[in-house]
Amino acid sequence: MAYRITGLDPAPFRHLWHTSEASLAQHGARRVRADTCPGYPDRITLSDAPEGATLLLMNHISMRTASPYRASHAIFLLEGADAPWDAVDALPPVMRHRLLSLRGFDADGMMRDADVSEGVDRTEALIDRLFADPAIHEIHAHNARQGCFAARITRA
């Protein structure tokens, strides 16, 4: 089954690019510098920021549906990133080597199934297994160790 993975749209974050630390603090955000690679997964490009890159660390609501599973967590955004990942049947770089928690949600935002995976073959097999349930509307990928939102997966 074909799947599509998309990074976050940068538009809602552009006003924060290169703003002052005081302005970032008003939004509950902080500027950080990547001191290792991999280690700072950008949620727009879905790649690891290169060592020395500047990112914003901020809270993001990944599940906005009025559901018990409404969720938010910290994410990294590569400052100035403007081209979100958008691909069919291809795992982005940040999802190829991390332990992931994939959570399948129906149209009402209720979790129908979930599991963990690591590596391209296992993750793609888990996506196929979750989408075999016709009630699963979308899958949310989270980094299993830190728990932060990684990406949204939909049917292509």
Image: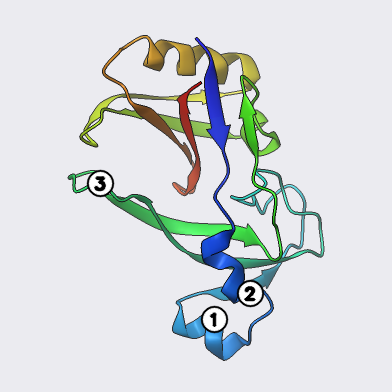
Residue 96 versus residue 79: which sits nearer the camera? 79
Q: Mark 3 points at which residue?
A: 65
Q: Distance between the residues labelled 1 and 2?
A: 8 Å
Q: Judge from the rendering whether residue 23 lies leftward or rightward of residue 135; answer left or right.
A: right
Is residue 132 placed above or below 12 in the rendered structure?
above
Mark 3 or 2: in front is 3
Quadrant of residue 77 within the rendered picture: bottom right
SS class, disc 3: loop
Q: Mark 2 points at which residue?
A: 31
Q: Residue at x 50, y 83 (%)?
A: 25
Spot the residue most to the bottom: 22
Is residue 57 placed above or below 111 in the rendered structure?
below
Structural crowding at the residue carrying mark 3, measured as other residues with C-alpha within 10 Å and reported as few (<14), some (14–19) or many (≥20): some
Mark 3 or 1: in front is 3
Q: Mark 1 points at which residue?
A: 24
Q: How far apart are marks 3 and 1 (CA)?
A: 26 Å
Amino acid identity at mark 2: Arg
Amino acid identity at mark 3: Thr
* Mark 3 or 1, nearer chain start: 1
Q: Which colour scheme is used?
A: rainbow
The spot of residue 91 in percent (x, y) is 64, 27
Q: Residue at x 59, y 50 (%)?
A: 43
